[in-house]
Amino acid sequence: MVTPFCLRQAKVNQRLRIRSIAAQGELGRRIRDMGLVPNTEIQVIGKAPLHDPVALRLRDFTLTLRNSEADHITVEALEPVHE
């Protein structure tokens, strides 16, 4: 069984599937407008030196999120990360 976790905890190069978006109101709408909706597959492609922001690859584009935004996104790993 796959354990869901917060997007902020994801590792670079990890492939994930979005399980849920907990943000409400304007923030929730903005996150969804960026294409971050349940069942979307994403990959963490980079993190800034202080781990904020995080760069994601989804569909055919790259997107960056602040950790304060990533905290509202629950994901599950699609495969283990090889460090």
Image (spheres, helix red, strand yellow):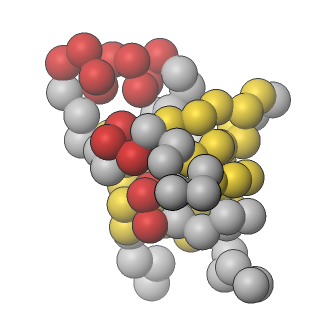
The image shows residue 5, relative to residue 25, as above or below, that is below
User: To which quarter of the image does residue 3 belong?
Assistant: bottom left
The image shows residue 8, relative to residue 36, as above or below, that is below
Q: Position of residue 75 (x, y in %)?
A: 45, 58
Q: Position of residue 70 (x, y in %)?
A: 40, 45
Residue furthest to the front: 49
Residue 39 seen in the current view: no
Residue furthest to the left: 25
Name the residue at 73% across, 52% down: 45
Residue furthest to the right: 60
Split into 4 quadrants, where in the image is the N terminus? bottom left
Q: What is the total number of numbered labels drawn onto the structure image?
A: 0
Residue 28 seen in the current view: yes
Q: Position of residue 29 (x, y in %)?
A: 33, 17
The image shows residue 59, relative to residue 73, as above or below, that is above
Name the residue at 56% across, 47% down: 54
From the viewer's side, name the closer residue of 38 and 15.
Answer: 15
Name the residue at 28% across, 22% down: 27
Q: Position of residue 62 (x, y in %)?
A: 73, 33
Split into 4 quadrants, where in the image is the C terminus? bottom right
Drawn side of residue 52 relative to residue 22, left or right: right
User: To which quarter of the image does residue 59 belong?
Assistant: top right
Drawn side of residue 34 relative to residue 69, left or right: right
From the viewer's side, name the closer residue of 2 and 33.
Answer: 33
From the viewer's side, name the closer residue of 80 and 38.
Answer: 80
Name the residue at 60% across, 57% down: 49
